[in-house]
Structure formats: C-alpha cells, structure tokens
Amino acid sequence: MLNQQTTEQLRALKLTGMLEAWELQREQPQTHDLSFDERLALLVEREVLHRENRRLTRLLKAAKLRVNACVEDIDYRHPRGLEKTRMAALVSCDWIRQSLNLCITGPTGCGKTWLACALG
C-alpha cells in the first residue's frame, strides 16, 4: 500500500527518473545493503540525469538538424584536411562564447552539413 502511494506521489511530482530508479532499487537486492543516504543520492542522481537527457532531446528536436551527427564520430583519416587540434578548439565552443561565427567551406560532398550538425 505504501509503495503504491509513493509511486503515485512521484508521478504527481513528475519525478519520473527517480521513480524508475526507485523501482530498480526495489528489484535489485544488492542496493538494499546501501545506507539511506547512498540510496537517496542514487535516486537524486538518476532524476538529474533523466531531466538532462529530456532537455537535450527537446533541444535537439527544436534545432531541427538535418543529420544525426556527433563530434565523437568524426573520421580524421579521411582526406578532408580536418585537424584534431582545430576541431577540439571548435568543440569547446569558445567561439560561441566570444560571439564569433563559423563558416564551413569545401567542395561538394566533403561533409560540411554533417560537420555543422555535429557541432550543433
């Protein structure tokens, strides 16, 4: 009975990540050995991660990027002239904080759109 009330209250408070973590803790006997503080910390950490993932998903959807690209997937072996050090500087986004623009140029088919989406 108490578990059902807790579940309903977590849903009402929109603590979905915490609810999922709590249900996992109840199913996994190894978490029962943890102290209250450790278990609570795991619940809160899961809620924070859940919210951050939802936020990123919402922002990526709103950005309407053409390609699902990621900077970690950049292939530096391909002869495009990309330098790892220069890309690392771009990935740090200091150029955005300095209110600078980025212009990506190159021949057709070299991956300009993909690279722009990865940086986005």
Image (tube, rainbow, N blue to C red):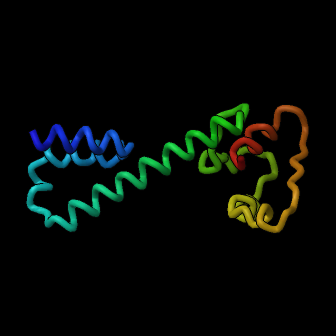
Question: Which quadrant of the rendered structure holds the N terminus?
Answer: top left
106 and 99: which is toward the camera: 99
Count of numbered circles on the image: 0
- Residue 44 pos. (x, y %): 33, 58
- Residue 5 pos. (x, y %): 18, 41
Would you identify the image quadrant in which residue 58 lies?
Answer: top right
- Can you say whether 111 is above or below 45 in the image? above
Would you identify the image quadrant in which residue 100 lies?
Answer: bottom right
- Left or right: where does residue 51 sit relative to residue 83? left
- Left or right: where does residue 19 sit relative to residue 98? left
Rendered residue at 83%/32% (across/down): 109
Would you identify the image quadrant in which residue 89 lies?
Answer: bottom right
- Can you say whether 107 is above or below 34 in the image? above
- Residue 38 pos. (x, y %): 21, 65
29 and 39: which is toward the camera: 39
Rendered residue at 75%/44% (across/down): 115
Rendered residue at 63%/40% (across/down): 60
- Residue 61 pos. (x, y %): 63, 35
